[in-house]
Image (cartoon, rainbow, N blue to C red):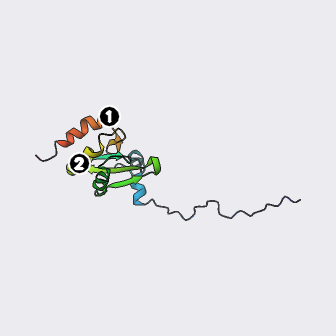
Amino acid sequence: MSDAPKYRPTERFWPYAELPEQPTDEELAAIDPDLHEALFGAGTRAFSITLVFPHLDVEDFERALSLARSLSDFRETGRGAGLRYRARFRSDQAEALRDLFQLVGRFDQTEVLIDDRPVPYARELWLPLVWFLLPR
């Protein structure tokens, strides 16, 4: 018996040699804010509040999802049980934020992020402050 291998490996080391060298816009949007700042420097992004929520078994979930999808800054991340919907709102979108929060905010799985970061009292302090921006 000889010790010759039964297959010949390819000359390439990486099996994913066709990957682009620059990240796509979607990949850049998904980067953690701290990592984005470390890589590209401090940006001048507008203040934002993001609602992150999973699939919820409630009557108005389709309405909530259509409201979130109507935003310019909406993303779906993950799969299966890890699927999350992310809707980012600027200060001029306070009414849409309130409408979506009324539908998904009562659930503990819903996260409120300030400038894409979890902040203490985001739900109890920051959101009521944004409600002051609503026209009366």
Residue identified by numbered label 1: 120
Question: Which residue reaches farthest right?
Answer: 1
Point 43% across, 56% down: residue: 27
Choose between 22 and 102: the one closer to the eye: 102
The quarter in which the N terminus is drawn is bottom right
Point 24% across, 35% down: residue: 125
Choose between 43 and 81: the one closer to the eye: 81
Badge 1 local density, few (<14 within 10 Å), some, or many (20+)?
Answer: few
Point 26% across, 48% down: residue: 100
SS class, disc 2? helix
Identity, as a three-letter code, of the amino acid under mark 2: Asp
Question: Mark 1 against mark 2, which lies toward the viewer?
Answer: 2
Marks 1,2: beta carbons within 8 A: no
The answer to whether residue 21 shows anywhere in this view is yes
Q: Position of residue 6 (x, y in %)?
A: 78, 62
Please state the total of marks drawn on the protein image: 2
The numbered disc on residue 56 is: none
Identity, as a three-letter code, of the amino acid under mark 1: Pro
Choose between 23 and 51: the one closer to the eye: 51
Residue identified by numbered label 2: 99
Q: Position of residue 90 (x, y in %)?
A: 25, 50
The answer to whether residue 47 shows anywhere in this view is no
Q: Position of residue 72 (x, y in %)?
A: 29, 58
Q: Is residue 94 above or below residue 72?
A: above
Left or right: 135 in relation to 39: left
